[in-house]
Image: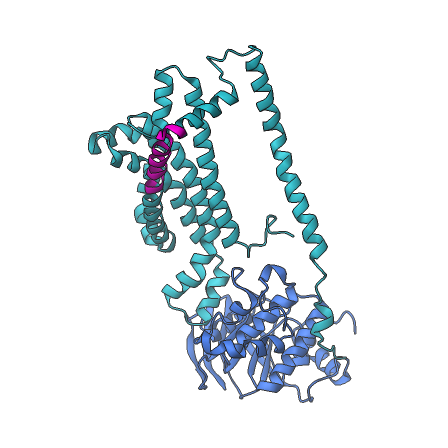
Amino acid sequence: MLKVKQATRTFNDGLAGFQNISFSIEEGETVGVLGTSGCGKSTLLRVLSGLDQNFEGAIEIAGMGEQPIGMIFQEPRLMPWLTVKENILFGAKDAKKKQGVIQEYLNLVGLSDFGDYYPKDLSGGMAQRVAIARALIGEPDVLLLDEPFSALDAFTKMQLQDLLLEIQKKRLTTMVVVTHDIDEALYLCDRIFILGGQPGTLQVEMPIDVAKPRDRGNTFLASKKAEILDLLHIEKVVD
Amino acid sequence: MTVKIDGKGLFETKEQKPVKVGFELKKVRGIALGFIIPFILLVVWEVAVRFNWLDAYVFPAPTTILQKIIELAAEGTLWGHVGITFFRVFIGFLAGTVVAVVLGSIVGYFKWFEQLMDPLIQAFRSIPSLAWVPLFILWMGIGESSKVMLIAVGVFFPIYLNIVSGIQGVDRKLIEVGKIYHFTTFQIVRRIIFPAALPSFLVGLRSGVGLGWMFVVAAELMGASQGLGYLLVVGQNTYSPELIIASIILFALLGKATDSLLKALEARALKWQDNLQNQQ
């Protein structure tokens, strides 16, 4: 569970960042954060992850795991000098103990035979899978994803979204996904937060009550998409 | 629409064997290609001396030079000369490297220490290293310590500069990964910064060892009773160009050997790098 109370973090004399954001996320829930660029959604994630400590307000993460937060960045950010296995174990507190389960994680992300490869030998999608395994092996209470698939091609992106859904189903990880891809948010999330303004404020909380896995062409989702586009003040070009 | 995840079919790698063999053959051919011109030059040189187109007193034939080296080896003095020169370079290189690693790491990591120390170090760098020779001799005499010191100073700068720029060039994004896992500063340095700065450090080592060989010549020319540089002086004073060229060749061989050693080390340590050299 993740609780944020009146959090504010601004830069550039209060013109960028976010302001007065409060929300709480249930255990096992997936929340998407959408917003136009510059509304502070990435900053919000940096604050939640602890990378940015200069914020006001309170953040509560209730969890017993060895590692409260796992983060998946837009880029895989693998250590190029470590093999896939070593990369997955990179942040593990007790690497020896995890040695036994490493294969399980490799299987989970579909890289069973790639444990001894170096990142240079992986494609972008494979590298991002490694990053997912690395974030998961610490069994974090909350998984934060910062535009995790935006650098990937559409097909790989869909594969990894399904992978994420599968993982979520298996381990009931609480997730916060920052994205600028409305379809991605609609496909993955139980609730969507829309940030707007500069600095950004939480404008709408939109529950998406559709069972997962969802049909990407679902008409209900399409109507939600139109609603979101409207909220973001983006004119619809194609329907 | 959902897309099935099927790891197997998607990530099948191609059979690599035939590519490997072709690669080996190419490598051998590449090396052979490099030997053609030196070989032709040697033959031309030898023939030119044999037919008295070149004066043997000025330009001894390759075989004469080879004979000289064999003669020195047979006398047993060669090993002493090579050994002491190698020893000086080794100790000087080691000393210079240790100081460069310690100073370079601190300067690279702590901004305030860089502001404190870097201007001074840069000022020292602009002094041509050979200008230290008289001072070192005055301070430490003509013995081993002044020679080793000179070599250490020469070796220090390229390694120091490369470590500093290597550390400062480490990707902030990788450091953030460590921060997510609540690494301590020490862990960040050991597990992210050092490995990431390693390529740059190894480049520094290689140029450092090159300079080490350069400075050992200077150190031995200025006064030594043994060593390859001493043989150069003896060759000059006794009018024996074959001795001079023999020493030069020995210097070249030793320099090449140490460089190859470091290069092999580099290739081993950096096989993870995504660069042209590691391309298959």
**Residue at (44%, 49%) from the top-left corner?**
B201
Residue B65: where, in percent of width, then height?
A: 47, 23
Note whether A203 is above or below B84 in the view shown.
below
Q: Determine whether, in the image, residue A140 is placed left or right of residue B12.
A: left
Describe the colour scheme in one phrase.
by chain
Q: Is residue B76 magenta?
A: yes
Residue A209, image quadrant: bottom right
Q: Is residue A149 magenta?
A: no
Chain whose colour in the figure is cyan: B
**Residue at (52%, 68%) from the top-left corner?**
A87
Chain whose colour in the figure is blue: A
Residue A229: where, in percent of width, then height?
A: 69, 75
Note whether A65 is above or below B128 in the view shown.
below
Write down the region rendered in magenta: B74-92
- Is residue A235 visible to us here? no
Note whether A128 is above or below B79 in the view shown.
below
- The main secondary structure of the magenta stretch is helix
